Amino acid sequence: MMTWQRGREARNARIQAGARLAKGKVVDARDATRLMEAVVRPGDRVCLEGDNQKQADLLCAALLAVDPAKVHELHMVQSGVVLPEHLDLFDRGVAKKLDYAYSGPQSARIAKMLFGGKIELGAVHTYLELFARYFIDLTPNVALIAAVSADRDGNLYTGPNTEDTPTVVEATAFKNGVVIAQVNEVVDKVPRVDIPGDRVHFVVEADKPFFVEPLFTRDPAAITESQILTGMLAIKGIYAPYGVKRLNHGIGFNTAAIELLLPTFGEKLGLKGKVASHFALNPHPALIPAIESGWVEQIHCFGSEVGMDEYIRARSDVFFTGPDGSLRSNRAFCQTAGLYACDMFIGSTLQIDLQGNSSTVTTSRIAGFGGAPNMGSDARGRRHPSEPWLQAGREADPEGSTLLRRGRKLVVQIGETFGEKNVPLFVERLDALDLAERLNLELAPVMIYGDDVTHIVTEEGIANLLLCRDASEREQAIRGVAGYTDVGRGRDAKMVQHLRERGVIRRPEDIDINPLDADRGMLAARSIKDLVHWSGGLYAPPSRFRNW
Amino acid sequence: MEDLSFRHATRQRAAGTKKLAVIGVVASGNLEVLAERVLPDSECLVEIRTAAAGFGEVWDAVIADFVKGYSPGGLRFSINDGGARPDTVSLRLAQAARLMQEDDQ
């Protein structure tokens, strides 16, 4: 007989098997591994909540401890491969296949395991892309998620780091999957309901809070003069002329410098209220002085940042907060905001080639993509106009019909020409290509494609790629800001001079910036302690950033 | 360690009367520059002691651009380099040249 309810029946069977270990929905932490063995089936697609920041570490340990004879060959579909245990699952044979987005701290080991054939790679995604696939062809059978607290009905409070949870739960719970949450505590009433209880099947109380990584804290004390110079160039040479109000910043030191220059250098240029007022951004501590100086109207966040909770709570005019007062973040919505509602992305990278393609992959590290390719790409589905978007479109296609010409998102790559250990930012050929060949990938892991990049900023100047009319102009514009790297020294000096006359390349002096003014005294805060002062004592930096 | 030395003819003497200036620090990724007004007005000498070997060509290019941009005639620069990036080298040299332009008190 034809049946259309097999998925539901299978879920009911899994829940029944797990229910033997539960009191209501609550399962004792000591039984977490037995719960996994009861609920997870060989070959299942499993989302083990590994976000950019928060980690379902207890459930990860529980899954790692299963008997591989009972649970094996899992297909992991998770945005962040962050904990060593995430990869231990593959070493033990519990998991076999991986689809992911970001692997920051595990980037070296994941590369090794891919080369060694320990992991069968599906694909490396951007966050939004992986989330999209949760609803089409990578829907999890089981989701193992993390929250701050739960009540006995399974209602979850995720706290400021909501991040991916609503998306993961939506895809799993409404397509016959099982949702298991680890929580820091089980309470009678949660402060706010981030995930309704009828989407959560089991709750495990952890003996310690889930792990969260402070990823967005940049110590102003470590910002160099060259980074300050690139920040000044970006503010005066890009933010100001385009009037960029809606934007996303990367997490590097160059953009931290920009955040700390807004209330000083930006103020002197009279830009307050005219630029950098609406952000899709994690709560960067470096943005505190700009917020306190009245620059920022609102910020929607992908996740939170360790130490920023009380500050955010006290600045609800700026941040999105719940009825309990704490931050509500949501990675899927914030990525969508970054894609469709921001006029600029500005961030750093590790390698840029002669076409402007960039990558953070090196031959021994696969860091994944995270959100940058989504932030740093032109949204072809965008239809609402804005002045920066239209202006960029005009520069790219001055002859085009006004009413039919697409605008362009400003996608800015910013960095010093040489990185750590004097490794050049500019290369003839991306290491990502070698990696793709060695792993037989069909696609090299390119972070931002050259045709999406509109500007490159280095200490040598700004290259406006929108104004380049062919591939050779583009190459020389890139060489022209590549400083003393081999790529930079390989420039055609005459052509670079010509591009400078046309305003394609602008040197600091072309926009009245003296590199000798790029002094640390320009920064609104010169230390983490200064940031604490700016916040009125509300920002509580993690101990590793304290030296007082 | 590697020792490098670059001698250039200059268009004009460095402005100011200051005899000596020091800027920067010897630290990883940074450098210390000592500038002295001890040469004939049409000459400039840059002597480098660096922790990072094999960057001779880059130093050559950085210093040639510096001499072209600032014409520091009469100055000898002694650099103690802790593996600084070229942009930091350019900046420190420019800072040293600016200090030398001040009048000696």
Image: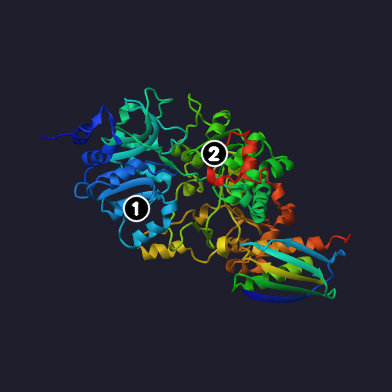
Residue A85, percent across and down?
A: 35, 50
Disc 1 and disc 2: Cα gap in Å? 29 Å
Q: Is residue B57 above or below residue A547?
A: below
Name the quadrant containing residue A248: top right
Mark 1 in CB contact with mark 2 (< 8 angstroms): no
Nearer-the-camera pick, A88 or A334? A88
In this rendering, the label closer to the viewer, 1 or 2: 1
- Mark 1: give few (<14), some (14-19) or many (20+) Cα within 10 Å: many
Q: In screen coordinates, is A233 left or right of A183?
A: right
Residue A155, percent across and down?
A: 35, 27
Query: Which residue was labeled with disc 2?
Result: A283
Which quadrant does the N terminus of chain A fall into? top left
The three-letter code of the residue at mark 1 reads: Leu
The three-letter code of the residue at mark 2 reads: Pro
Residue that extends furthest to the front in the rendered view of this protein: A548
Query: Which residue was labeled with disc 1?
Result: A87
Residue B10, percent across and down?
A: 80, 73
